[in-house]
Image: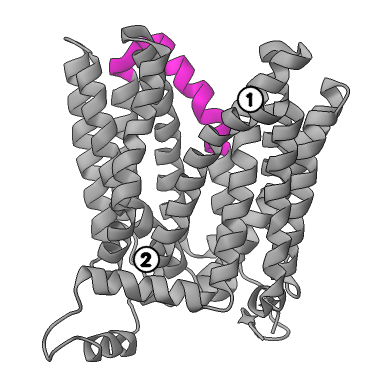
Amino acid sequence: MTTTALRAPGTRRPSAFREPQFARYLAGQTISGFGDQIWFVALSWSAVHLASPAAAGLLLMLSSVPRLTLLLLGGVIADRFDIRRLMMGSDILRAVLTLGAAALATVAAGIPMLVVLALAFGAVDAVFLPSAGAMRPRLLRPEQYQSGSAAAETTSRLALCFGAPLGGVVVAFGHLPVALAVDGLTFVASVLTLATVRPRPIDPSAAAQRAAAAPAAGQRPGYFADLRQGLRFLIRHPLLGPLTATGLLANLGFVGPMNIGLAELSAQRGWSATGIGILLAGFGLGAGLSALAMHWVHVSRGAGIIVAVLGAVEGAAVMGMAFAPALGLAALAALVVGLCTGPMSVISSVLSQVATPDELRGRVSSFSTMTTYGAVLLASSGMGLAIGALGIRGAYVLSGAIEAAGLLMLVFPGLRRARIEAG
């Protein structure tokens, strides 16, 4: 049986915000998240106006290439070096690049400059994202993981909901140079907060075991050996393997309908762009409320079962969006999708954090992040093909069925018996 011991009997579950350095860290990452949304809006708007909508799509895809290519190596680097310094170095580099590009854009903004920025940001993300994945649990005690995950999920939803509109205002006010300058300042804010935190050091006994596994005395395993070690750990772990597969299926089924699918669904139903906004608002409201609720709703028994069942319910709600006879009912289905998303993300994050030792957090985080970004690319391209072959309803049914297939992962005892212990 896979269990997760989080607190002693009779004790209150402390909030993550009782750790001042976690609060500072989260504040810096939230500000940086707003900057990311401003950057995406500025990149898309500038590419469309300097070239074409196709160029905007190509630029967004370009940033994914180095990110996906280097992510696994970035996970190894995060486990080998100081994650705080890696994150600070990444943000300093991005701040210099962005502020320099802002100055250049006042003279001559062009597609080549945006290409360089997109590629550079993608490469830096490959190191930053696994380091960030390893940072949060090392700022908290295990009994604070759920509170910390709920807070991170809530703030990320806030950045998604309000960052893009803010980016639109910034771009409208000052165009590309001002948007880049604001984005660069958010990286500076992240650096300042990172300078004030000190993550928990890795257990010396784990480091000793790792040194003993070196091919010869005084030598460390190579990067690819470390990568294989992390992959073996993830695949063989009774909980993390099926949990990762469940998350991958959820992303594959969710991304297409909630991105490309919404535009086609609204067009076919005559809901126009207003319909897209209403459906996204329904989803965002559900995701935000459910993430916020996880600050107070504590899951113990059946945590793995809850994740799989929520994925199936979310899949059914995705199907319901395509069969709803009116926009209001489709928005209600989108609300249910959002209500499932928050708890799934928080519970999965807690289970993963407790099951992963500190010395492997970077690699496990890189695998998880890679499956998420990979699912986005596959689902986005596959949704268009599915609509062409099956029609809009058929494509939504296929997507919902892929999400519901996460229930099959309950055949693995590690996921079926996973629990977040109260004592």
Question: Counting other residues with Cα less than 10 Å from the Cα at mark 1, is it few (<14), some (14-19), or many (20 or more)?
Answer: few
Locate residue 63: give its quadrant.
top left
Q: Name the residue type under label 1.
A: Gly
Q: Secondary structure at mark 1?
A: helix
Q: Is residue 290 above or below residue 31?
A: below
Between the residue at mark 1 and the residue at mark 2, the CA separation in whole angstroms equals 38 Å
Along the polypeptide, which appears first: circle 1 or circle 2? 2
Q: Name the residue type under label 2.
A: Arg
User: Was residue 175 drawn as part of the magenta stretch in this picture?
Assistant: yes
**Residue position marked by numbered label 1 in the rendering:** 388
Place of residue 238 in the rendered image (x, y in percent of width and height, measured from the top left): 57, 79
Magenta highlight range: 158-178
Q: Secondary structure at mark 2?
A: helix
Name the residue nearer the viewer: 5 or 322: 322
**Residue position marked by numbered label 2 in the rendering:** 363
Residue 50 seen anywhere in this rendered image of the structure: yes
Name the residue nearer the viewer: 389 or 183: 389
Locate residue 397: give its quadrant.
top right
Q: Residue at x 54, y 71 (%)?
A: 240
User: Was residue 45 drawn as part of the magenta stretch in this picture?
Assistant: no
Place of residue 119 in the rendered image (x, y in percent of width and height, measured from the top left): 26, 35
* Left or right: where 104 falls relative to 22: left
> Between tags 1 and 2, which lies in front?
1
Q: Residue at x 18, y 10 (%)?
A: 108
* Left or right: where 395 falls relative to 24: right
Place of residue 88 in the rendered image (x, y in percent of width and height, measured from the top left): 26, 51
Which residue of the protein is positioned furthest toward the left in this rendering?
218
Locate residue 306: give its quadrant.
bottom right
Place of residue 343 in the rendered image (x, y in percent of width and height, measured from the top left): 69, 55
Q: Is residue 5 above or below residue 374?
A: below
